[in-house]
């Protein structure tokens, strides 16, 4: 269920987003957003795969509340520092990344990609904290955050088009991931001892 709902919901919402952006701002705008999404997917899949292999066993092995929290927040600091370095590198090399991953047709994306990178930074922290919920078998909480995250992204994008136009999904992605990071941080800090 944890995997199935996001696998159905996320693509459905992304199809809606593509149609919404294409019909409202033209298919070039929708294409730019999809190009940024492809770069983020490449970043996030690599990051989440490594985190799953490295973090999940260590978090699962921490059986006491104090040990769990110390392990989690020690790993979180390292993850965020690595993410900051990678996002900084991606920001500096974004034109080359666009040319490599997409084409020169997508170079106007260069001015919008920094907001996507901010979202990717917070998304890295979300992966770390989400894995902590998975390690503690808090699947309902994890699933709820996944669904809320997708719905916030769509809502912020649609509402933001009035002020930001076709740039709205880039701002929405950064804001949605920042909010979900704070939400997950609160949830992991308030995990009940009984659940551990």
Image (spheres, rainbow, N blue to C red):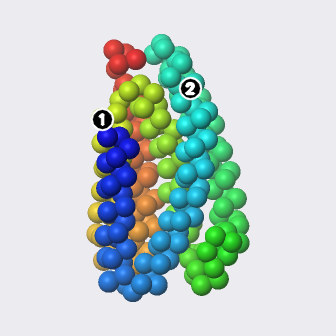
**Residue at image coords 31%, 70%:** 16
Position of residue 109 in the picture relative to residue 96 (left or right): left
Q: Is residue 189 in view from this perspective?
A: no
Mark before the other along the chain sequence, 2 or 1: 2
Q: Which residue is denoted by mark 2 in the rendering? A: 57
Instruction: Please state if 8 lies on the left or on the right of 76 as rendered.
Output: left
Residue 181 against residue 92 in the figure, above or below: above
Q: CA distance from mark 2 to mark 1?
A: 20 Å
Please state which of residues 54 and 186 is positioned toward the viewer in this rendering.
Answer: 54
Which residue is found at the position 33% from the left and 55% from the top?
8
Numbered tag placed on residue 130 in the rendering:
none
Place of residue 138 in the rendered image (x, y in percent of width and height, measured from the top left): 35, 29
Residue 159, image x, y percentages = 28, 69
Q: Residues within 10 Å of mark 2 (few under 14, many from 20)?
A: few
Q: Is disc 1 surrounded by few (<14), some (14 to 19) or many (20+) residues within 10 Å?
A: few
Q: Is residue 2 above or below residue 20?
A: above
Residue that mark 1 sits on: 140
Looking at the rendered structure, the secondary structure element under dot 2 is helix
* Residue 175 seen from this side: yes
Secondary structure beneath dot 1 equals helix
Can you give x and y, in whole percent of width and height, for residue 131 in the image?
Answer: 47, 35
- Quarter of the image containing the C terminus? top left
Residue drawn 53% across and 72% down?
Answer: 35
Q: Residue at x 38, y 44 (%)?
A: 3
**Residue 183: image location, x then y, percent:** 37, 41
In this view, the residue in front, 8 or 32, is: 8
**Quadrant of the image for the N terminus?**
top left
């Amino acid at each position: 269920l944890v995997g199935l709902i996001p696998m159905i919901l996320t693509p459905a919402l992304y199809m809606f987003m593509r149609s919404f952006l294409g019909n409202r701002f033209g298919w070039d705008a929708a294409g730019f957003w999809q190009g940024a999404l492809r770069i983020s997917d490449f970043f996030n899949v690599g990051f989440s795969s490594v985190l799953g292999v490295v973090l999940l066993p260590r978090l699962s092995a921490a059986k006491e509340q104090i040990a769990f929290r110390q392990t989690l927040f020690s790993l979180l600091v390292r993850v965020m520092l690595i993410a900051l370095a990678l996002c900084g590198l991606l920001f500096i090399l974004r034109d080359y990344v666009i040319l490599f991953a997409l084409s020169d047709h997508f170079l106007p994306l260069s001015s919008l990609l920094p907001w996507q990178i901010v979202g990717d930074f917070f998304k890295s922290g979300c992966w770390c904290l989400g894995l902590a919920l998975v390690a503690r078998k808090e699947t309902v909480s994890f699933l709820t955050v996944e669904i809320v995250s997708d719905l916030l992204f769509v809502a912020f994008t649609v509402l933001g088009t009035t002020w930001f136009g076709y740039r709205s999904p880039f701002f929405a992605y950064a804001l949605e991931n920042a909010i979900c990071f704070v939400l997950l941080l609160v949830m992991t800090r308030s995990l009940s001892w009984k659940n551990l």
